[in-house]
Amino acid sequence: MTTLERPNDRWLRGIGIPLIVLLANLIYLKDYHENPVLYSGWVFIGMGYMTLAWEGSVSWVHYVRTHFPDARHTFRRITITFAGYFLLAIVCQSLFIFLTDLSGLAIIPITPRVYQAYIGIGIVCSLILGTTYEIIYYLQQYRNAIAEAEAIQKSRIQGQFDSLKSQVNPHFLFNSLNSLSALISEDKQQANKFLEELSSVYRYLLQSNDRKLVTLQTEINFIQSFFYLLKARYGPAIELHLNLDNSLLDCYLPPFSLQILIENALCYNIVLADRPLIIGIEAQSGRNQEVKSLRVWNTIQRKNLQVNRQPGGLSQLTERFTLLRLPRPVITDDGHQFSVRVPLSVKGAEFLINLP
């Protein structure tokens, strides 16, 4: 169940309530014998009645929207909303006429035709106001969708820029070329393999420009190529442990998520041959059939020197998951192991259809 804000309709109430009451009382102006005092008194009574009836209608629409927020429930939500409007109109108008007659304030004889006329007016007003609220609601949803799409696009472009920048920066190129140069003189076969993996890394960076999500299998293939380059640089000082459920390889996550987490581990921890940094990636099934989880962990051997935070990182990763309407990653640090659990969305999940 989603919690939504109540409609901000002060301007609509400020215009709608006086307009409806004044027009409704003008219909019965002759019955007031054009008495301004009598007319003003019924306007005052009508204002109080309309304020209560309007508040009931707004509370009802807020209740229905809270319980049926998804786009796939639109028809059901509108049907229930307008059914409630009409029921409220019938009950409120009938009760108003009954109490008016009972109190002796009625200026015309109360007959079944009067009930029909008042109820008809109430239903028409409910239809007009309900339609107005729906139009306002859809305009707000449209604006929100545009804002979310722009935020996702900005986050994705920034993430791609940071990822690409981290790969093409002079240090990375220098280390990669040094490793390649050493392999060419020592083992041409390994040099060819290194060049293939380097090409795979850049190919993935270019191909993922327009993707909001990729499969876990695709991301793992990229990480294996990326880690091959790291392994060529660090040797036995770094290890990668994969423990993946094959049934989860077709689940989705944002591209470069695993790379960000691996680089975060390298940024804050010592990498030595006698103290290898161990990084693990585990994909675990959860009870919820729409959302699984993936855990990336590393052993903690923090650097003594303070390091500057790089642009992006965990904060940007969290923002990307939030914008994609996925649960936020959960970070755990027990002093021995640092881990980040991120959600995986199953293929065909409903939110994938509605992504901006």
Image: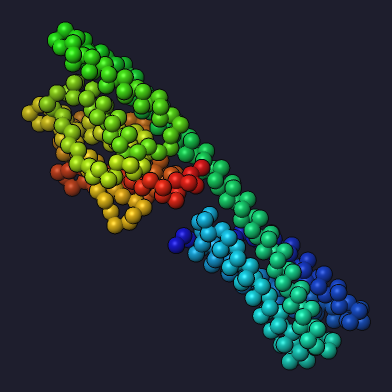
Q: Does residue 289 appear left or right of residue 117 in this picture?
A: left
**In front of the other: 341 or 35:** 341
Q: Does residue 154 appear left or right of residue 125 in this picture?
A: left
Which quarter of the figure has residue 23? bottom right
Query: Percent from the top left, x then y, of residue 311?
Result: 36, 31
Q: Is residue 171 visible?
A: no
Q: Does residue 305 appear left or right of residue 92 in this picture?
A: left
Q: Is residue 216 visible?
A: yes
Q: Is residue 338 above or below residue 74?
A: above
- Say which quadrant the N terminus sits in: bottom left
Query: Percent from the top left, x then y, of residue 338?
Result: 21, 42
* Residue closest to the far top: 185
**In front of the other: 10 or 178:** 178
Q: Residue at position x 24%, y 29% from top?
A: 224
**In front of the other: 209 or 14:** 209
Q: Residue at position x 63%, y 50% from top?
A: 139
Which quarter of the figure has residue 99? bottom right
Query: Percent from the top left, x then y, of residue 274?
Result: 7, 28
Q: Is residue 25 above or below residue 79?
A: below
Q: Residue at position x 46%, y 60% from top?
A: 2
Which quarter of the figure has residue 100? bottom right
Q: Residue at position x 27%, y 45% from top?
A: 247
- The colour scheme used here is rainbow
Q: How many marks?
A: 0
* Residue closest to the far front: 247
Q: Is residue 215 above or below residue 234?
A: below
Q: Does residue 78 appear left or right of residue 263 in this picture?
A: right
